[in-house]
């Protein structure tokens, strides 16, 4: 551990704008890691498609979950056929990076997008991890830190018990400076230097934010990539839903069938890249693979993230590990606009029994920790008093928090906003089965001695609730993105039986994300976007070297 970053932390009540962050990595040295393995084969010459006669598209069943995603269900029914070098399924961040990279290599590229407008989840992103770039070196110099590749990689893989592929992080770091420069060359607009995420989160100041505003990925990244792709002759077809992969008799992928308003489109392609953005818009898949209760969650994912690409790949024998992969979370409260109130650490969390269950500052390093903490309980409520409502509102967690709470209470039908004169009254109104009065009394003991015996909450966030009134705000999870599910190798090739590459098929971005499990962490902020760019560019580089 090198230098410790100084950060202000006020005693008593502190909002999310004054969270502390203890630096644990040293940064500055350019990565000296070997580049990714581009020497793996796995592409095959184009061959004739295996025969198929049925043109019906049956619904998936328990016996055949991939029904409707098989080539034989579309063969012979195409109303249009096109031939291209690359067919990229999905026009989000990774898909458009791949499209531009392929076109810059002189290849004919077709992008298929199921929705009316392109961009997918890339339209609402915030930053990209950058290492070894001039922006990163200046950002780390600001904090007097030196960050090394090995420290980043160790931090990432230890969090997931070494169940993720560290070589993908090694490649991402090794190529990061060049990838950052490539994005700038293609019009992407970044802030001048890297920083900690949101100014105080993450373990390293390696988050390169967009230039305009926090969630301006659409303006600063996607629109420039759309323009670059158009200038290079990339064709993007919207309202075109890819449904099945064509294969030859030896199992090599030879193209795609897609549904359009005019019928079935048949695409013959030398390379197919899956960039569908995962399945976080598909409640059935969130329930099956994530274990989420569809009645208790909402989704903020792009509408096209329906898991079609996972089903297409699985239908031809690709390995899928969806139940083990990760998610990005949000925490919402019905009738309130805030999504960051769990980041207000002086509040107290209780579950459906009125029992406290975690240190409420767990999201100080990574906001997604609040998502996993909430998900471990059946119900979760954040408890505030009047002073905390005002403090949370003033700190930016919700600029209209009090007004929204009062409006929810006034309408009399609120299911997530409760107010009680004291602990007993609040417990009665919410209907907690346990002893909330004792829970609060025990917490007040921790406040008095400024030490949390149960969960180790930072003493600076231990604040008394006084005598009342008290508010209970029921949190529900909002899923932003699924991460991974289609198993890939180091070159982003989809693998099948025996982990052998499926010739001519790649999965990138959220489809083939192999560096997260369970949650998206902020150890290294912007890591998912960095692997979007890495997988988009280097899947194409591998394909150009081996599939033509």
Image (tube, helix red, strand yellow):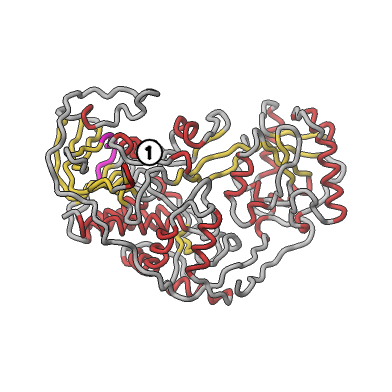
Where residue 86 appears, x then y in whole percent?
Answer: 21, 49
In percent of width and height, residue 23 lies at 61, 67
Of helix, strand and loop, which one carries label 1? loop
Please name whichever residue, 48 or 242, is drawn nearer the observer in this view of the structure. Answer: 48
Asked if residue 447 is positioned above or below residue 134 in the image, the reply reads above
Which is more toward the observer, 385 or 100?
A: 100
- As drawn, the residue found furthest toward the front would be 498
| Residue lying at the far left of the rendered structure | 48
Can residue 355 be seen?
A: yes
Q: Is residue 184 above or below residue 517?
A: below
Residue at numbered disc 1: 304
Give residue 117's quadrant in the image.
top left
Classify mark 1: residues with Cα within 10 Å, few (<14), some (14-19) or many (20+). many
Q: State which quarter of the image contains the C terminus.
A: bottom left
Relative image position of residue 163 (x, y in whole percent): 48, 51
Identified at 74% across, 32% down, the residue is 353
Q: Does the magenta stretch include residue 458?
A: no
| Drawn side of residue 125 relative to residue 474, left or right | left
Predominant secondary structure in magenta?
A: strand
Residue visible at 27% across and 24% down?
Answer: 57
Tell me what residue is drawn at x 79 percent, y 33 percent: 426
Task: Determine if the magenta segment contains residue 242.
Answer: yes
Comparing 398 with 108, the one in front is 108
Q: Where is residue 411? Give x, y as percent.
A: 68, 28
> Residue drawn at (54%, 57%), measured in percent from left and top?
158
Q: Is residue 263 visible?
A: no
Quadrant in which residue 40 is drawn = bottom left
Q: Is residue 537 left or right of residue 138?
A: left
Q: Which image quadrant: the N terminus?
A: bottom right
Write down the region rendered in magenta.
Answer: 236-244
């Amino acid at each position: 551990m090198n230098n410790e970053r100084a950060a202000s932390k006020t005693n008593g009540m502190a909002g999310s704008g004054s969270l502390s962050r203890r630096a644990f990595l040293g940064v500055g040295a350019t990565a000296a890691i070997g580049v990714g393995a581009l020497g793996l084969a796995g592409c095959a010459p184009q061959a004739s498609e295996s025969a198929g006669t049925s043109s019906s598209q049956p619904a998936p069943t328990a016996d055949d979950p991939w029904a409707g995603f098989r080539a034989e269900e579309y063969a012979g029914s195409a109303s249009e056929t096109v031939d291209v070098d690359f067919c990229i399924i999905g026009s989000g961040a990774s898909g458009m990076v791949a499209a531009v990279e392929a076109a810059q290599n002189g290849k004919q590229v077709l992008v298929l997008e199921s929705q009316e407008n392109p961009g997918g989840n890339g339209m609402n992103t915030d930053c990209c991890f950058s290492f070894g770039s001039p922006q990163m070196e200046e950002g780390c110099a600001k904090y007097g830190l030196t960050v090394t590749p090995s420290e980043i990689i160790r931090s990432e893989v230890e969090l997931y018990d070494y169940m993720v592929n560290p070589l993908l992080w090694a490649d991402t770091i090794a190529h990061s400076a060049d990838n950052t420069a490539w994005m700038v060359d293609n019009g992407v607009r970044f802030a001048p230097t890297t920083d900690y995420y949101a100014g105080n989160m993450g373990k390293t100041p390696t988050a390169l934010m967009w230039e305009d505003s926090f969630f301006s990925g659409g303006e600063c990244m996607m629109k420039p990539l759309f323009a670059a792709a158009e200038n290079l002759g990339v064709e993007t077809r919207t309202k075109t839903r890819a449904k099945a992969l064509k294969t030859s008799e030896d199992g090599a992928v030879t193209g795609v069938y897609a549904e359009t308003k005019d019928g079935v489109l048949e695409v013959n392609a030398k390379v197919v890249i899956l960039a569908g953005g995962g399945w976080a818009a598909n409640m059935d898949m969130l329930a099956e693979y994530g274990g989420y209760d569809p009645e208790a969650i909402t989704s903020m994912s792009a509408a096209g993230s329906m898991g079609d690409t996972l089903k297409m790949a699985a239908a031809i024998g690709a390995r899928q590990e969806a139940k083990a992969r990760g998610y990005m979370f949000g925490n919402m409260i019905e009738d309130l606009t805030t999504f960051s109130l769990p980041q207000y650490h002086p509040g107290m969390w209780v579950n459906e029994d009125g029992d406290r269950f975690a240190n409420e500052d767990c999201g100080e390093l990574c906001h997604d920790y609040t998502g996993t903490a909430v998900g471990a309980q059946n119900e979760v409520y954040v408890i505030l008093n009047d002073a905390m409502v005002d403090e949370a509102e003033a700190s930016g967690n919700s600029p209209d928090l009090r007004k929204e709470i009062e409006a929810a209470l006034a309408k009399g039908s609120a299911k997530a906003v409760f107010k009680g004169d004291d602990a007993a009254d609040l417990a009665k109104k919410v209907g907690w089965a346990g002893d909330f009065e004792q829970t609060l009394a025990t917490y007040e003991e921790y406040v008095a001695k400024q030490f949390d015996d149960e969960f180790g909450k930072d003493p600076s966030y231990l604040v008394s609730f006084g005598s009342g009134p008290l508010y209970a705000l029921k949190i529900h999870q909002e899923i932003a993105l699924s991460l991974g599910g289609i198993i890939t190798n180091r070159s982003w090739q989809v693998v099948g039986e025996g982990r052998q590459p499926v010739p001519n098929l790649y999965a990138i971005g959220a489809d083939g994300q192999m560096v997260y499990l369970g949650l998206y962490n902020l150890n290294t902020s912007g890591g998912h976007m960095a692997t979007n760019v890495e997988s988009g560019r280097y899947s194409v580089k591998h394909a150009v070297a081996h599939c033509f």
